[in-house]
């Protein structure tokens, strides 16, 4: 993360855009953590991000507007595979309540060097107030965060005490400053809810303009969900059960949550738990015509209902949703699902099944599939492979991955397919 962040800092310096990094900056990690940046400009920041991406060669793959004035971007470097997460805001507005102006955060900011590149951090009192308010409002304060606050306290104790008085009564300020000075934050941890309530009372109610902006933000999340619905398909032996957990693990940091389903959009599956082995997937006798027709009706209801109840709400919550098998497996291997009705009817129903954002087919030659699993005959493995490839040709958002490679290479190819898809989606949404 550090190299992309350094490029972003240099970009802001070149553009002469006033900014500062809020939160701990010592040893800024290249991990899954995000970097909070306050800018002297109003949201949205799409043009700024697009200009930076064009100049640096990185790709924006995610954008979450989590507050009226705050946008969370994930940037990806296709060459190195590096991800950077930038949380940009101007005024600090939380749940529609105005808490701090960008001007008071940026005033008296000072330059520091991170990785050889100069960036700016706020004055100690502004840094303490911003970070403490943020953690109190989220009702979350860890040992590492309290250590950071205590270090800031000793840089400007008198000024910090005065600033805290804007939001809390004098007895509470005394308790907070005692905790910061001594390093014993037990009283603060025990009274997070009380401190949050007092903070909200001092901050006041949501303004009418912020209410309108908040409605627009929520509406934007509804019509442009930031989650992703991915379906993994492939013949028996292609390695789906091994690949999916690893892909989910690698790309889940781009999202807030992850969910994995097997075949149907119900009963989320533990990604660490493989399916029970099926020794003879085509061994059961097929159902009759009427039973097969009723089966299609039931599957249609399960998929459409599951999409409304589980999939779409999860996409709104920015969830990485992966499926091991989907309705369209029935089109390739009707014997497995004991379907004996007309193929045209199964294809017709399939047209009305909610489609994923991305199809990933794990493809391998029949001899490779047979070397891994002998649940079906070699001829059936070859037939399934051809059928899956033909099926994928009907979908413009399908990617075929060579599953005969090593597991690490297959996972890497799937990972890049997901990130490239996110990059294309962001290009459409940001207009860049």
Image (cartoon, grey):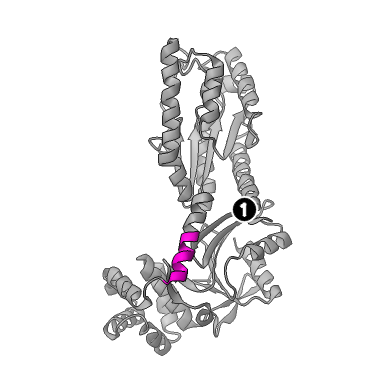
- Give the residue drawn at x 42%, y 84%: 154
- Quadrant where the C terminus lies? bottom right
Quadrant in the picture for residue 20: bottom right
- Give the residue drawn at x 30%, y 71%: 197
Which residue in the structure is indicated by mark 1? 429
> Picture coordinates of residue 113 (x, y %)?
61, 75
Please check the rendered image and state whether residue 212 is part of the magenta-colored stretch, yes or no: yes
211 relative to 225, above or below: below
> Picture coordinates of residue 139 (x, y %)?
34, 66
User: For this rendering, which residue is in front, 113 or 263?
Assistant: 263
Visible residue check, residue 236: no
119 relative to 66, above or below: below
Dot 1 alpha-carbon crowd within 10 angstroms: few under 14, some 14 to 19, many 20 or more: few
> Picture coordinates of residue 71 (x, y %)?
54, 63
The magenta region covers 207-216
> Picture coordinates of residue 203 (x, y %)?
38, 76
413 sits left or right of 239 in the view: right
Q: Main secondary structure of the magenta part?
A: helix
User: For this rendering, which residue is in front, 86 or 409?
Assistant: 86
Please check the rendered image and state whether residue 199 is part of the magenta-colored stretch, yes or no: no
- Give the residue drawn at x 59%, y 18%: 381
């Amino acid at each position: 993360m550090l190299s992309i962040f350094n490029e972003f800092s240099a970009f802001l310096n070149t553009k002469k855009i006033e900014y500062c990094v809020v939160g701990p900056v010592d040893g800024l990690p290249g991990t899954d953590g995000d970097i909070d940046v306050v800018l002297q400009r109003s949201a949205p920041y799409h043009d700024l991000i697009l200009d930076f991406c064009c100049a640096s060669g990185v790709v924006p793959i995610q954008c979450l507007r989590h507050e009226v004035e705050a946008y969370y971007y994930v940037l990806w470097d296709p060459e190195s595979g590096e991800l950077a997460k930038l949380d940009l805001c101007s005024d600090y507005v939380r749940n529609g309540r105005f808490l701090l102006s960008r001007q008071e955060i940026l005033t008296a900011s000072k330059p520091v060097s991170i990785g050889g590149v100069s960036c700016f951090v706020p004055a100690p009192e502004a840094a303490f107030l911003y970070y403490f308010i943020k953690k109190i409002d989220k009702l979350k304060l860890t040992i590492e965060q309290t250590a950071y606050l205590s270090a800031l306290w000793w840089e400007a104790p008198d000024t910090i005490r005065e600033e805290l008085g804007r939001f809390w009564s004098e007895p509470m300020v005394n308790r907070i400053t005692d905790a910061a000075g001594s390093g014993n934050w037990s009283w603060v941890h025990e009274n997070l809810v009380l401190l949050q309530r007092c903070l909200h009372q001092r901050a006041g109610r949501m303004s009418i303009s912020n209410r309108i902006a908040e409605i627009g933000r929520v509406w934007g999340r509804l019509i442009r969900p930031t989650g992703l619905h991915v379906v993994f398909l492939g013949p028996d032996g292609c390695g789906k059960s091994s690949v999916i957990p690893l892909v989910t693990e690698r790309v889940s940091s781009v999202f807030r949550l992850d969910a994995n389903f097997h075949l149907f959009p119900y009963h989320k599956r533990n990604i660490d738990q493989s399916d029970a082995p099926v020794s003879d997937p085509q061994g059961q006798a097929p159902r009759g015509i009427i039973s097969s027709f009723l089966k299609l009706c039931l599957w249609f209801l399960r998929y459409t209902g599951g999409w409304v109840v589980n999939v779409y709400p999860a996409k709104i919550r920015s969830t990485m949703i992966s499926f091991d098998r989907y309705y369209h497996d029935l089109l390739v291997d009707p014997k497995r699902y004991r379907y004996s009705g007309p193929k045209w009817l199964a294809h017709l129903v399939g047209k009305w099944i909610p489609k994923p954002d991305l199809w990933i087919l794990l493809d391998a030659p029949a001899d490779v599939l047979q070397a891994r699993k002998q649940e079906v005959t070699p001829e059936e493995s070859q037939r399934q492979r051809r059928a899956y490839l033909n099926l994928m040709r009907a979908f413009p958002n399908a990617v075929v991955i060579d599953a005969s490679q090593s597991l690490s290479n297959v996972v890497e190819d799937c990972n890049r397919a997901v990130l490239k898809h996110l990059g294309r989606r962001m290009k459409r949404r940001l207009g860049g």
